[in-house]
Amino acid sequence: MRPRIALPADTLAEATNIINERNAAFAPRPAIEAIVKAGGIPIIFPSVDPEDVADYIDLFDGVAFLGGADVDPTFYGEEPHEKLGVTYRKRDLFEIELLKQAVAKGKAIFGICRGMQLINTGLGGTVYQDLSEDPDATLKHNQEAAGNMPSHHVSVDPNSRLFKIIGARPYVNSRHHEAVKQLADSLKVTARADDGVIEACESIDNDQILAVQWHPENMYKHHADSKALFADLIARSQKVAERDRQ
């Protein structure tokens, strides 16, 4: 059986005259397709009461926390910065609880952009609410190039799992104004942009968590390193599936 990959949904916040689209839950089509192409079965989870997470936890083998709105800074003990973007607390509450239970159950975890920031926050880290807070951030991290095109390089730690997956110097896309500030104690930095901004992290003691600041779901069709990140998620999730179904 192919591994099942949970995709916590975003919520459509734009005004619409179609009643069935108001506040509709959705997952990005590129992420769905990347998971299917890599050999997984995507399952979209709408944001519901965190108390309901326990009823979701046995429905999946791996989970991908995707891009979207800024994480509410009160989750890491800060008030909103003047350049904070749109937040959606209901999604944050659901995803943080889903993360914690997924960690406890040994599920495979992957983070993309906001997803990396959410993972870090949920595990006790902090986030720059805007890169203007980081005096060393000088590169353009919110590209104006097409979203499926790379815009800057990152340097990967040769002692990391990520290095084995994508190599030393991948060329990545970049659409973010927030970034990891203080990394959670259970994680380690595995890649940085040339200005020092954290671009990837992973678990210190095992292969459970891997997260990147860029958007491989937009580049997997034409970039081998992006495709490899989804292949890695499926491989890790397959191990979880085999363990849990014995």
Image: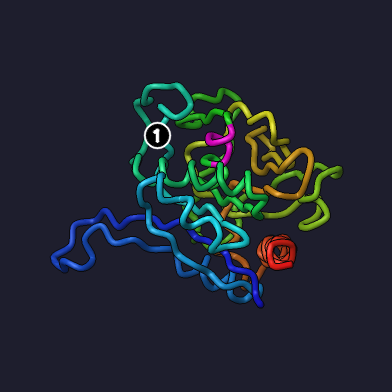
| Magenta segment | 119-123
Q: Is residue 207 above or below residue 22?
A: above
Q: Eyeballing the image, is 71 above or below 26? A: above
Please give the name of the residue rendered at 71% of the width and 43% of the height, measured from the top-left corner.
202
**Most foreground residue, 48 or 10:** 48
Residue annotated with mark 1: 72
Crowding at label 1, few (<14), some or many (≥20) Cα neighbours within 10 Å?
many
Q: Position of residue 6 (x, y in %)?
A: 53, 61
Quick one: quadrant of the N terminus?
bottom right
Front residue (pair 36, 84): 36
Q: Residue at x 62, y 76 (%)?
A: 37
Q: Is residue 39 magenta?
A: no
Extreme residue in the front direction: 246
Q: Residue 135 sits in which quadrant?
A: top right
**The C terminus, quarter of image:** bottom right
Horizontal side of residue 17 vs 60, given as left or right: left
The image position of residue 166, as x and y in percent, is 76, 57
Q: Is residue 224 visible?
A: no
Q: Is residue 34 visible?
A: yes
